[in-house]
Amino acid sequence: MKHLKNKYLIATILFIGYMLFIDSNNFIRQYNMLHELAKVEKEREYYLREIQENKSTTEELLNDIEMLERYAREKFLMKREDEDIFLIVRPKNENQP
């Protein structure tokens, strides 16, 4: 009974309850936002690496004609007029890695 009359304890409990559940910036939302921020930062790092790789590939392709031809043949299956391309499609076997 003595603790129920303590106005500071009651105010503290009400404040903590308000901050945990009712406030628009409650602790649960802050926790979820921190996880979302970590996820977005990982995505940002991934895209920055991809941009760097694409820049280096673009630089190589602009400066080396042989590399450009090789890239076009591998990625876009381009060919010269006197050539034929044969694609070998292997079925995926679950036993093989």
Image (cartoon, rainbow, N blue to C red):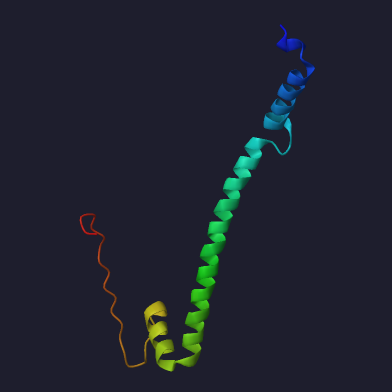
Image quadrant in which the N terminus is located: top right
Q: Is residue 6 above or below residue 19?
A: above
Residue positioned most to the right: 7
- How many marks are shown on the rendered structure? 0
Residue 91 figure quarter: bottom left
The one of 73 and 66 positioned closer to us in this rendering: 66
Q: Is residue 9 above or below residue 27?
A: above
Q: Is residue 53 above or below residue 46?
A: below
Q: Residue at x 31, y 82 (%)?
A: 85
- Counting from the top left corner in percent of width and height, residue 90 is at 25, 66
The one of 37 and 64 positioned closer to us in this rendering: 37
- Counting from the top left corner in percent of width and height, residue 96 is at 21, 59
- Counting from the top left corner in percent of width and height, residue 58 is at 51, 83
Image quadrant in which the C terminus is located: bottom left
Left or right of 5 on screen, residue 81 = left
Residue 25 figure quarter: top right
Left or right of 37 on screen, residue 67 = left
The one of 17 and 71 positioned closer to us in this rendering: 17
Residue positioned most to the top: 1
Q: Residue at x 28, y 79 (%)?
A: 86
Q: Is residue 36 above or below residue 51?
A: above
Q: Residue at x 56, y 52 (%)?
A: 38
The one of 5 and 67 positioned closer to us in this rendering: 5
Residue 81 figure quarter: bottom left
